């Protein structure tokens, strides 16, 4: 995996890249970064996988200081990055909050999107999840939260969202260090305070009009985002839903093969590049 960065509109944007072929852009959620896709990208064939890091997340936490990092604004950051790199139209893959970003990109920047793969993501009114709402209510305290308290807080979230303790531990080792290096609680506070359900409610009526090739992948046992929303999303997008029995929230980390297979299935349905 190659780590790259580029200045786009005065922001140093970072992504991880692997492979060659048709571009596929991957967008993570909270509390993760580009590393969420580390097991998916090496499984891709015929694709140039680019795991874009949202401004204010992961190793790009510091780029979010003093900036709007809402889902609506991340959409515009992503669009500017895709245009700067000349990637569109690309396959767009989104998870959690990143899925909301990808939905909005398809609605407002249709020319940049060749197809959608959405997994366990925010949509309609299914977010912010209760834990995020709680953290937002105590945000002044969260900003000063010491590492000794923040570490178990994030560890519990990882445990609840993964199939096994081993997978949760491996994921925590990937996603905790950026928080440790960049203010921890203050960074998480900025993220949770940016979450606004109006960003997805605003596009509900446009989803059935997209007429884009799309696939939905969802963990049947996701503790936060009920699979019922996955079925609704699949219906509105006229998409196939891949239901993962026993799957929890962090499907890209627990079931990377299933996610990669779904992306390949979408790729096979698209017209050849050029």
Image: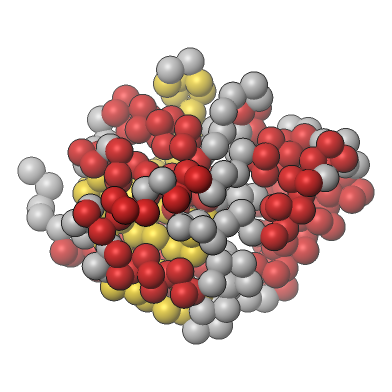
Relative to 23, residue 46 above or below: below
Which of 134/264 is in front?
A: 134
Q: Residue at x 10, y 55 (%)?
A: 271
Q: Quadrant of residue 239?
A: bottom left
Residue most extreme to the bottom: 245
Q: How is the image coloured?
A: secondary structure
Q: Does the rendering let one see residue 139?
A: yes
Judging depth in this view, the residue of 229 and 205 nearest the camera is 205
Residue 219, compared with residue 47, is above or below; it is below
What quarter of the picture does the C terminus occupy?
A: top left
Res. 42 image quadrant = bottom left
User: How many numbered circles does the render carry?
Assistant: 0
Residue farthest toward the top in the current orientation of the protein? 10
Residue sitting at x 33%, y 68%: 234
Left or right: where 36 falls relative to 274 = right
Decide: is 128 above or below 190.
below
Percent position of residue 93, x then y: 38, 53
User: Residue 73 at x, y = what percent?
Assistant: 47, 32
How far from the left and from the top, in percent, is residue 187? Answer: 72, 36
Q: Can residue 181 be seen in this view?
A: no
Q: Give the image location of residue 184, x and y in percent.
A: 78, 39
Residue drawn where x is 82% and y is 45% of the image: 138
Residue at horizontal 73 percent and vertical 39 percent from the top: 189
Q: Indicate left or right for 99 with 29 as reference.
A: left
């Amino acid at each position: 995996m190659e780590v790259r960065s580029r200045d786009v509109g005065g922001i140093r944007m970072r992504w991880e890249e692997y492979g060659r072929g048709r571009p596929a852009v991957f967008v993570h959620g909270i509390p993760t970064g580009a590393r969420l896709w580390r097991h998916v990208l090496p499984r891709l064939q015929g694709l140039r996988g680019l795991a874009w890091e949202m401004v204010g997340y992961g190793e790009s936490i510091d780029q979010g200081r003093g900036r709007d990092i809402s889902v609506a604004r991340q959409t515009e950051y992503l669009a500017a990055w895709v245009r700067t790199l000349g990637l569109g139209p690309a396959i767009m893959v989104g998870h959690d909050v990143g899925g909301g970003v990808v939905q909005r990109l398809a609605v407002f920047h249709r020319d940049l999107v060749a197809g959608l793969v959405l997994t366990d993501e925010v949509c309609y009114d299914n977010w912010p999840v209760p834990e995020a709402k709680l953290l937002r209510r105590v945000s002044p305290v969260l900003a000063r939260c010491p590492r000794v308290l923040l570490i178990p807080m994030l560890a519990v979230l990882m445990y609840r969202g993964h199939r096994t303790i081993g997978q949760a531990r491996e994921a925590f080792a990937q996603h905790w260090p950026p928080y440790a290096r960049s203010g921890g609680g203050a960074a998480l506070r900025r993220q949770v305070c940016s979450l606004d359900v109006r960003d997805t409610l605003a596009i509900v009526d446009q989803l059935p009009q997209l007429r884009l090739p799309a696939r939905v992948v969802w963990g049947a046992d996701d503790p936060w985002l009920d699979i019922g929303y996955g079925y609704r999303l699949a219906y509105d997008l006229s998409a196939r839903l891949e239901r993962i029995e026993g799957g929890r929230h962090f499907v890209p980390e627990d079931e990377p093969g299933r996610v990669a297979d779904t992306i390949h299935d979408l790729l096979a349905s698209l017209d050849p590049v050029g």
